[in-house]
Amino acid sequence: MKRLVVTIGLTVAALILTSCQSTTVVELTRFTLSNEAVRIAQDTETKHTFWVTVSAVPTDENNRAANLVLADGPLVDGELLLSQRVAEPTRVLISIKLGIKETERRLFAVLKPNAEINFVLNYHNPKYYSIDLIGADHRSLDPDRKFSLTGDISGLAGVEPNLQERIPLYVSVIERQSIFDDSDEAFFFLPSLLLDDGKFSIDGDIDEPIIVTISIRGRNSPGISAHAILEPGVNFSVVPLGNSGKLAVQADRDSVQSRLMSSWQLDPAFVSLLEQRMDSRTSEGGVSADREEHVNDFVSSYQIADECDHVNMTNENKSEFVGPIPSAYQTLGNEIVTKRSTSIRKMLRDTQDSELARMIFNLNWILLDEGTARNVSVLDERITTLLELVQKVDQEIVDQFITPRVDEIKRFREQILNSRTLLPGHLAPEISLNNIAGDKVSLSKVLEENELVLVDFWASWCGPCIESFPALKKMYSKFKDRGFEILTISLDDTVKIWTEASESHNLPWIDLGDPKTGDKKIWNIRPSQMDYGVLSIPSTFLIDNKGCILDKHFSDVELKEMLSSRLAGVN
């Protein structure tokens, strides 16, 4: 049976606010639904006529919906009585129209005999309005499967006072699919729930412990999130994690959450690291090393290949390729990743339960997703976690899942390092790929026949790549007879996409393709992409006839200057 979690969205709004999409003033009308009537809340003024329908949505033994209308009509003097009442907690569909001819807005909730449902209508204009639950969304129908989750963001570090009166926010609780699960059965449900004075309360039914992500953010804006392991029979609360600006989830009893997450997350040493990282954002820009010293170290260690000693690289030229100085924020972030992952991996090693081992692995994998994708420390932790999982699962999973991912992550790691270390004054890696006609073309052969070769990585979906073609065509026309050649490499997924794009742009130079191969669920880094450390496109390299890189990642204007200078005397 597929595991199921109720996924709920919450939105913070004030009674009057300005939409981020327009300057239209929002009018917010608050309603209550009880087992007796739908009513507009007291002290709420509105100019609209509301047509409300409330339908019970039970299911029969065949899991077929059988709607039963409990109320249907206009609110008169702010009230619409129910024609029938529910005898037990019942899933209901609430629909509202502004007048009988308008399009309805709907939400689902659970109506209980002795409780009220609070919801609001957010009105922007006749075509843009919505209805949202407020404060609480209690959907549990089975006490044996029930979990609860409460929260209060008012004490969270970094949250301004009265924030909810100015910025719409929402909270979502989303089940995270296991990395081992390739099915498309994930359940996703996202109605809206307004916070009430920064607080929210949720409950629902689940069959077994599941990993979830709890996010608080404004619509169309970044926010803050926390991860948790929910399980039946446990009450959870979302709380500030010290003064770090982060959230933690606490269980009210011994649980999978307390053993696998709280055990390290609430450790004072870990919280202290988070707080230090929070403080580093405002302390002298977070720079942890002197820039001049950083540049000098890079320049002094810069090496020119013996075959490329003719490439003139001044210290100023070398300094153009120095990487960014690691900030305190980044350094502390790496420490946090390592400390957290080390704690979780110890639990993975210690458990003898294969199912629990999978959950621990999934937890660490999800948490590592928070790290920068190009962070080598994060990649190393992924590799280590995968290798430790080998001892906990059968050989089929090792062969089909672990080994291919370890190999691919190692390739990606090498690609990142190549992006930093393949520099002017180094030999260009060999390239041997097919052109559109299917003929194999090698970079070394092209270099034998030319003075300078531009290697340019592109794809049909890359706007800046396409925009550069007119300027490249002009330079190619001017310099091709002086020993200049262009070798573009398409990173499109398929040969068909590449050839169609190449022909549509009528490229006059050598155009090669390096399409994807193999398992499409893995990154599948192309050989040329890895060798040249291409992490984004366009990515350009100017190479001389000795195979040495003269420059990389330059503009069309800079390329024109280099060609004019180096090929000026060539006939």
Image (cartoon, rainbow, N blue to C red):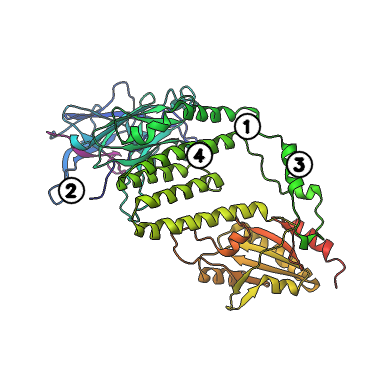
Q: Position of residue 558 (x, y in %)?
A: 76, 56
Work out which residue is located at the far right of the displayed protein and give it: 569
Residue at position x 73%, y 45% from top? 298
Task: Please tell me in which quadrant of the rendered image residue 139 appears.
Answer: top left
Magenta span: 86-108
Q: Amino acid at mark 4?
A: Thr
Q: Nearer the viewer, residue 218 or 42?
A: 218
Q: Amino acid at mark 3?
A: Asn
User: Mark 1: which secondary structure?
Assistant: helix
In what quadrant of the picture does the C terminus appear?
A: bottom right
Mark 2 sits on what residue? 65
Q: Which of the two labelled residues, at mark 2 and mark 3, occupies the earlier sequence position?
A: 2
Q: Amino acid at mark 1?
A: Gly
Separation of marks 4 and 2 at Cα, in angstroms: 49 Å
Category of crowding for the residue at label 3, using alpha-carbon neighbours closer than 10 angstroms: few (below 14), some (14–19), many (at least 20): some
Mark 1 sits on what residue? 286
Q: Which of the two labelled residues, at mark 3 and mark 1, occupies the earlier sequence position?
A: 1
**Which is closer to the viewer, label 2 or label 3?**
3
Q: Which of the two labelled residues, at mark 1 and mark 2, occupies the earlier sequence position?
A: 2
Category of crowding for the residue at label 4, using alpha-carbon neighbours closer than 10 angstroms: few (below 14), some (14–19), many (at least 20): some
Q: Which mark is residue 59?
A: none
